[in-house]
Image (spheres, rainbow, N blue to C red):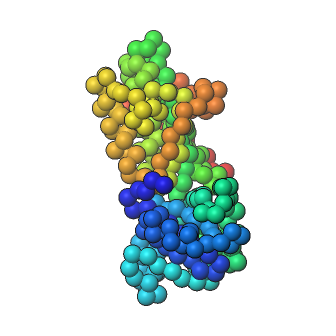
Amino acid sequence: MAEQKDAFFVVTKGDVVGIYKSFSDIQPLLSSSVPGETLNIYKGFSLPQKTQEYLDSHGLKGASYSLSAADVHEGLFGRIDACPYQHPSSSQRRAFDGNSSSKSLQRAIQSDNSLSCILEFDGASKGNPGPSGAGAVLRAEDGSKVYRLREGVGHQTNNVAEYRALILGLRHAIKKGYKHIRVQGDSLLVCNQIQGLWKIKNQNMAYLCNEAKELKARFLSFKINHVLREYNSEADVQANLAINLKAGQVEEDCQLL
């Protein structure tokens, strides 16, 4: 299992909660488990400072910690995701349903949706190159807000407009304080270049890709997926509206749900 900088793992075994710095530290625990024993593993991407202070105040200093489930309060770990593992004595992968003997632990292992968002982006160019616009739709994952964003791009290609749309959405997500983001767009080129799957031959594309990656690095978690055009219609609407804006002009609409 790949590990990331600042990642940590939360393990629940009965009423005991353990916090580990690496997955390799959990191996002895997995080896000692028996079939049928309740053992749940969750992965987080950055242990909140307030959690570190909370653990320190309970005398739990060091590389790994353990505490009672009764001491776990809502939001203690920030965003954590269920992490499947292969039980040593079983050929089947176990699923994690998030059950716990403590209701407070159930709340703690839920994602912190107030810090998570979904970004849909799209670019439009009449003539390719021609008058262009960037559009983005940013949704709070808890469903509380939707931001619709538009930016005039000037006389550019469609690929430039696509990158500018992604950058527009990422900047806005950072501005609004989101820490976890899931991105989708219908540009296969942008999605694959951001993931390092496709080489970049055009210098202008390289500059825009680097700018997007710098913004990407400011999130605790980042995922990007390519979708078909029909599933990206709202961002497409914003991109076409943006064609009529001056280069660099940005418009924003916010809807509270």
Q: Position of residue 177 (x, y in %)?
A: 46, 56
In the depicted structure, whether residue 248 falls above or below residue 21: above
> Looking at the image, which residue sits at the far left?
203
> Looking at the image, which residue sits at the far front?
89
Any part of residue 152 in sight:
no
In the depicted structure, whether residue 92 falls above or below residue 54: above
Left-right relation of 73 to 63: right
Quick one: 20 or 140, which is closer to the camera? 20
Any part of residue 36 in sight:
yes
In the depicted structure, whether residue 21 falls above or below residue 124: below
In the depicted structure, whether residue 206 falls above or below residue 53: above
Residue ID at (47%, 33%): 191
Left-right relation of 201 to 53: left
Q: Position of residue 149 (x, y in %)?
A: 51, 38
Residue ID at (64%, 31%): 231
Quick one: 83 or 245, which is closer to the camera? 83
Quick one: 210 or 245, which is closer to the camera? 210
Q: Position of residue 112 (x, y in %)?
A: 57, 62
Determine which quarter of the picture holds residue 195.
top left
Q: Position of residue 228 (x, y in %)?
A: 60, 27
